[in-house]
Image: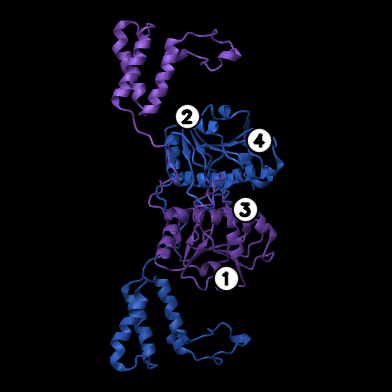
Chain colours: A blue, B purple
Amino acid sequence: MAGTNSERQLLTEGPVIILVEPQMGENIGMVARAMANFGLSVLRLVNPRDGWPNEKAQAAASKADHVIEGTKVYDTLEQAIADLNFVYATTARERDGFKPVRSPVVAAQTLRAKFQAGEGSGILFGRERWGLTNEEVALADEIVTFPVNPAFASLNIAQAVLLMSYEWMKSGMEDVGSVPFQAMSQTQSTKEQLFGLYDQLEEALDARNYFHPPAKKPKMVDNLRAVLSRRAFTEQEISVLRGVISSLDRFSRKYPRGRRPPVDVKEQSEDDSSAE
Amino acid sequence: MAGTNSERQLLTEGPVIILVEPQMGENIGMVARAMANFGLSVLRLVNPRDGWPNEKAQAAASKADHVIEGTKVYDTLEQAIADLNFVYATTARERDGFKPVRSPVVAAQTLRAKFQAGEGSGILFGRERWGLTNEEVALADEIVTFPVNPAFASLNIAQAVLLMSYEWMKSGMEDVGSVPFQAMSQTQSTKEQLFGLYDQLEEALDARNYFHPPAKKPKMVDNLRAVLSRRAFTEQEISVLRGVISSLDRFSRKYPRGRRPPVDVKEQSEDDSSAE
């Protein structure tokens, strides 16, 4: 899915990602990569098992060097969140407690609002094997949990960070339907162009006695036009379709149906059955 | 993030995931795991580089055995999608073409509508290094692309599958804010209980000449009550707070401030500065 445009500005705003006692360097690297994809860049580690820096993390980060190089390590979770105003704890398990539980969409909207208000925010992710302790969850303001299949809930921390980073990115877009690029600009054909297609096709079919018996012709034409008008063609598409009809109408086959084409005529269509 | 509840029903509905010429078994396994988390289960492979079955895929699937065991292999993409009605192609790059480009949210809504109408649907994911060819994209009905950071677009196929699977799951929920579990049921305290807290605290403070000078007392009380009423306390929380005030009000310190507690009195609070 390589689509990096190095001339565009690197997005580096948003909540701090805090990993509590992460064990695998590969996971830390995948977390950095996930963050970078969605414009997050501040990563903090509480007591990483294998120390820091970590070669496996760097390898797995896939060029998210700006995240890895800026990563800071803390002895305690309290220190890691001391300068933040608002913190989410991620958890897959129901906890006894009074903290509000939010979906990723709602959590991302809250984080966006905090960001716009100039507040520092963060998201806590627990250990690979058993997540966050109740005491760690208690340090957060609210809980965020993912809408996973109850019978197979097995998100790893890099996947969980990916989903929160993705929702963060989406929370900054005006419309969740917006996309970074669009199909080529398309203008629907004029009706005159569409009628030209009808005329050409119907004449070519008439010449082959397609509309048979004659009494059924009006209904058959209606049906044909319904097929051709169900989707609005562009001028260019009409042009392509008319070329196809011309080819079928004007030229005879260069070799019998069912045979493979000889090399010198392979540009021709192999099948002219579209008239039926 | 372990939270699997094996007694709940395994969700196995939804679009087919089709990987075109995947190279790394680990990625296929992570794809299966991502799918299972969000209730998808039908995986198809077109010409996997290392053949099938694949031990590395099984290891990386993290118990998503039902997905791995049901995976089917095809020689061509055309065969892999032959029985489907509607297909998305995922791509990170802008393509020359007329296909509509959708965000994951909109694509998931479309897939949900197709599913509810009984149509078979699928999502194509390309090779790790260079995605789908233009000819492969042309076989799809529409394009879906991810709102990534333009300066760092580096989603791998397992991450891309995770995001689409997650949006599929969300598209089936009535409210994107819904969560699988909630905080413990909380009933806001009655006003009488709140006023009891005010009375107790203000009396204890009065007894210490906190409201000084007396002319400022009404304003100080207002401020104090504003702090205590900004968030609606539950009956249980009021009870906890009243216990704290009682402890501070009724009992004298057992050791001077700033010293560590002797072992036998460590249950007592270490700091009584809350009156200021």
The x and y percentages for residue B61 are 62, 55
In terms of sequence position, does the residue under pointer 4 or pointer 2 come before the other?
Answer: 4
Residue pictured at 46% horizontal, 31% vertical = A119
Instruction: Give the SS element for disc 3.
Output: loop
Question: On what subunit does the disc labeled 4 rest?
Answer: A
| Separation (CA) of disc 4 from disc 3 | 23 Å
Residue at image mark 2: A85
Mark linked to residue B59: none
The x and y percentages for residue A148 are 50, 50
Residue at image mark 3: B62
| Separation (CA) of disc 3 from disc 2 | 36 Å
Amino acid bearing label 4? Pro
Quadrant of the rendered structure where residue A117 is? Answer: top left
Label pair 3/2, CB-CB below 8 angstroms: no
Q: Is residue A143 something that shows in the picture?
A: yes
Residue at image mark 1: B77
